[in-house]
Amino acid sequence: MDESGLTQQPKKQKLNEERDVVDRNIKCLRNLPEEILRYILSLLPTKDAIRTSVLCKRWEYLWTSIPNLNFSGLKPDKRKQFMNFVERVLLLRDSSDIKTFTLSCDVLRDASHVKLELAMPCILKLPPTICFTNLKTLNFSYVTFTKEHSTEKLFSGLPVLEKLELENCKWVNLKVVNISAPKLLSIRIVEDWENQNDENGCQVMISGVSLNYFRYCGEFYNEYHVHNSPSLVEASVLASWYNERKRQIAHRMYMLLTGFSGVKELTLVFCAVELLTYAVEVVELLPHMPIFKNLEYLEFDELVVNLDSVALLKILQKSPRLKTMVFSEGMSLSSDYERNDRILDPVPPCFLSQLNCIKDYEGDEEELSAVKILLKNAVVLDKMVITCSHHFAKDLEKQKKVHEQLLKLPRGSKHCELVFLI
């Protein structure tokens, strides 16, 4: 036997041994229970899980039970094959227990082929019958809804939906849309671009008996109403406005607020207080301001909030159980009220029995008058926390002076503690 034959034999023997190992592993896999095999497949990318169907007869349809489907088709030259692949998978896959479905591709002219789309900047074409029986999270971004009947079907066919996000969606040619989901826990709405060809926008009616979180951010191109939501705990509104639409935005801001009468935590951001003041003074909605019967935490996350704001004073009068009030960017008084001690007259009920914590951000001399009024009238206040702004924290001399002035201010509560944070 020559030398080359001697070297080939160990290689052949090694190859046979490796084949034996593979065969034993395949045999072990074949003997595993289907539940374990399905679990293994669920850990693979969707495309690889489907490829296992060629291994043997038993594996042919195992992939049809994987709970997570993830499709990504970003190659233009493979677009047709990708579409056919996705459609075939969805036809073979039983949709009853799908947990997550992700489709990442350019829609272009193929909107009618899309079964579920999260970010789709085009008109959404919906089938006549829609029901996502197991869908818990639904996010729509840049979607345009145009058909009233199919849109109503979509938002009423979500029996177990828990989280809904609508980002820059358009409601074109729709007057009223009802969003009703019995298990809905959280909804977030963002709209910072205008509805084209629809000047008056749409009335969006939101109902969820389990709803506990609501957040709106935008310019109120549409009118939103929250009703039949007794479980609502936390609400946040970030509003902005333009002079030419100020009256409309103020009215819609107020209408949204009327649905928060049972909320426990409320955050008003950016121009929200100013808009409410305009709504109260100009649109004359003052008599209709709701009572916030459960409100315990109120935060103003704006540049600066005027303590003498009509809207702020009205909210305080209508919040009998308020315990904590936060001015994230500081507070002040308008020039007409610098020496006026009668701003809180009559004193809001919460100041006499509930309000025990006030948090303020700036803590400089300009806020002293506003702080003085709060300290004097909050008779059960336990703590006022003052966090110095960055520029103020650097001026130690000014900081010491303001600190001394604050300590000298009269306090309606004998137990009130002043806490300074730098």
Image (tube, helix red, strand yellow):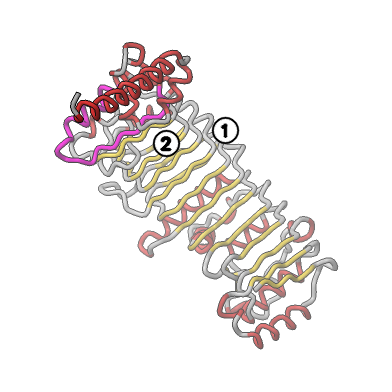
Residue 127 located left or right of residue 328: left
Please give the label number shown on residue 209: 1
Dot 1: what SS?
loop
Residue 84 located left or right of residue 245: left
x, y percent for residue 65: 40, 20
Give whichever of discs 1 and 2 has the lower sequence position: 2
Q: Amino acid at mark 2?
A: Leu
x, y percent for residue 27: 40, 15
Where does the N terminus fall, quadrant-wise? top left
Task: Name the dominant secondary structure of the magenta segment.
Answer: helix
Q: Amino acid at mark 1?
A: Val
Q: Residue at x 37, y 40 (%)?
A: 140
The residue furthest top is 57
Dot 2: what SS?
strand
| Magenta residues (range) | 66-90
Above or below: residue 158 compared with residue 271: above
Mark 1 Cα shell of 10 Å, populated few (<14), some (14-19), many (≥20): some
Q: Residue at x 61, y 85 (%)?
A: 395
Where does the C terminus fall, quadrant-wise? bottom right
Task: Name the residue tied to disc 2.
Answer: 138
x, y percent for residue 314: 62, 59
Mark 1 to mark 2 CA distance (whole Å): 18 Å
Above or below: residue 216 compared with residue 383: above
Q: Residue at x 54, y 57 (%)?
A: 268
Q: Nearer the viewer, mark 1 or mark 2?
A: 2
